Image: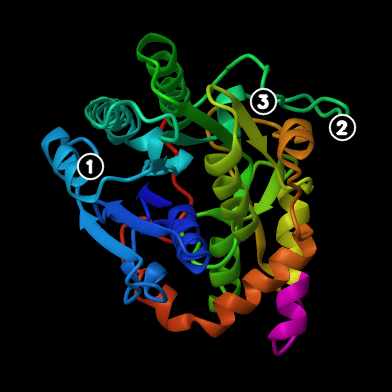
Amino acid sequence: MKLLVTGGAGFIGSAVVRLAVSRGHSVVNVDALTYAACLDNVASVADSPLYAFEQADICDGAALKRIFDTHKPDAVMHLAAESHVDRSIDGPRAFIETNIMGTYEMLQAARAYWTEQGKPESFRFHHISTDEVFGSLPNDPSVKFTEETPYDPRSPYSSSKASSDHLVRAWHETYGLPVVLTNCSNNYGPFHFPEKLVPVIILNALAGKPLPIYGDGSNVRDWLFVEDHADALLLVVEKGELGRSYNIGGENEKTNLELVRTLCAILDQKRPKASGSYSDQITFVTDRPGHDARYAIDPTRIRNELNWRPSVTVEEGLEKTVQWYLDNETWWRALQDRHGVGERLGKAS
């Protein structure tokens, strides 16, 4: 299968690219190389005859037409997006442009290409989204997001992703474009750009800096190892039912404070401080606006229909992640001068 992957130099996209190539798929990586992208993420497959790279903005319809016509993919995996909630609070425009207008341009380019090819039944447009479109859950373990949960986005980021989800469904219903959708929980793992919670905590800890936690740290997230997510995404694009959405979760709920303490304990073991614990650096900071209390995914559909489950627990995945950062200092050092890296943003009133 030839896959056109947007955002393939980003965190989740690069995991998809690496896994797809390792499984023998041809991959065309389309990425604008904005601040959070890094071609080092796909260096391990860059010389493969199965890999091709196109630097292009998904808002550029003419560039997308050329790429479709040149590479003639069998399926699209659309991951390119602005994704940091904090940045969306301070600068929402980029999220509207990329996540909504970019998805529109992708849908138009894919529909034109699919039509020109005679509308092959095997073609797929796989839109990758987030559980944040569903809003916030009560602190009740029995209540989780399902594919039927009404949308209730609370941030500029989640609103832009909800909009893109609706566009994809509309192109399926109105134009017949063969689509599948996925909504995932919080990802973590190797190559995670160092502005998100897990890498911020690891790198601040190593640098002796405060470990910032919003509010009282009680916000709950379901944590999904990025390589498990990539495996699920490839399964959905190959075997998912057209027009259907699948929630992909890690089945690993933790409060932010629990997560940070787990990371500190792993670091205490792997790279002990001269005295004390890394948890001594924990600092509670003013909560961000519209901070959802809890996310949790019910993965029944993907488990029952596609026989998929995550392969690692959050403890196992975090240990792998910490070790990766300890072993790959050259990678993250090169990214730390980019704007906002290592900070907690989203403080606009």
Amino acid residing under circle 3: Ser
Asked whether 11 falls inside the magenta stretch, the response is no
Q: Residues within 10 Å of mark 3 (few under 14, many from 20)?
A: many
**In front of the other: 255 or 6:** 6
Which of the two discs, 3 and 1, labels the residue nearer the N terminus?
1
User: Tag 3's secondary structure?
Assistant: loop
Which span of residues is magenta-colored? 265-277
Image color mode: rainbow
Q: Quadrant of residue 36?
A: bottom left
Say which amino acid is labelled 2.
Pro
Q: Which mark is residue 68?
A: 1
Horizontal side of residue 3 vs 85, given as left or right = left
Q: Quadrant of residue 112?
A: top left
Dot 1 lies on which element?
helix
Residue 23 position, x and y percent, is: 53, 64
Q: What residue type is disc 1 on?
A: Phe
User: Are the two marked residues, 3 and 2, in contact with CB atoms closer than 8 angstroms?
Assistant: no
